[in-house]
Amino acid sequence: MLNLLEELQKEFGLTYLFIAHDLSVVKHISDRIAVMYLGKIVELAETEELFSNPQHPYTEALLSAVPIPNPEMRRERIILPGDVPSPINPPSGCRFHTRCLYAQASCKVDEPAFVDIGGGHYVACPILPFKRQRSKSAVLPRQPVKR
């Protein structure tokens, strides 16, 4: 089905709004990706840019959960603390601050601006100016499971 959509897109010059939770499918079909959290876009970039250089902490966590199609390799998962807040009554400030590993006091108050950080890569994260130290979602050799 996805290949048919791609063929129709090329043949007729179509644009799709494709909404999904399977990031491997999203990567396959999309030229640009917008990542949303509680109804707000938190990051927008070209597909390869987003997958190779995620800037929002939520995007990093999502991408760390994408399986690697090699049983000899594993990815370092980012496990977010807490539960997803109610979308009916979202938190003040940055909607992600209640689960963010880098949140600061200002994140609870100020809603972040959606800023182009270069090349059409947009991010809504007030931590970016502080050039936070991120642990990249490293791909590591799989360790044997001890039983």
Image (cartoon, rainbow, N blue to C red):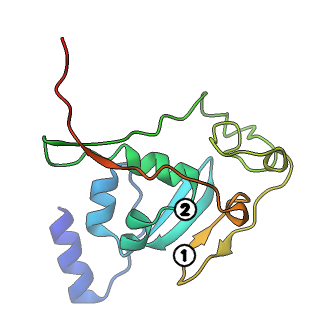
Q: Which mark is residue 121?
A: 1
Residue in the picture at 51% in, 58% down: 35
What's under tag 2, amino acid-wise? Gln
Residue at the (27%, 45%) spot, across then down: 140
> As drawn, is 111 to the left or to the right of 145?
right
Residue located 72% across and 66% down the image: 129
Alpha-carbon span between mark 1 and mark 2 = 9 Å
Secondary structure at badge 1 equals loop
Residue underneath mark 2: 55
Image position of 52 (left or right of 72): right
Foreground of the two, 40 or 97: 97
| 50 left or right, relative to 146 | right
Amino acid on which disc 1 is placed: His
Give above or below for 83 relative to 125. Answer: above
- Looking at this view, name the residue that lies furthest to the top: 147
Q: Which mark is residue 85?
A: none
The residue closer to the viewer here, 22 or 131, is 131
Q: Position of residue 47 (x, y in %)?
A: 38, 71
Q: Pinpoint residue 26: horizontal percent, then vertical percent.
A: 33, 60
Label 1–label 2 contact, CB within 8 A: yes
- Residue 101: name its quadrant: top right
Taking the view exactly as shown, the residue that stands out farthest to the left is 71
Using the image, determine if residue 16 lies above or below residue 41: below
- Quadrant for the N terminus, please: bottom left
Quick one: 129 or 107, which is closer to the camera?
129
List x then y, in percent, for residue 30: 34, 70
In front of the other: 76 or 87: 76
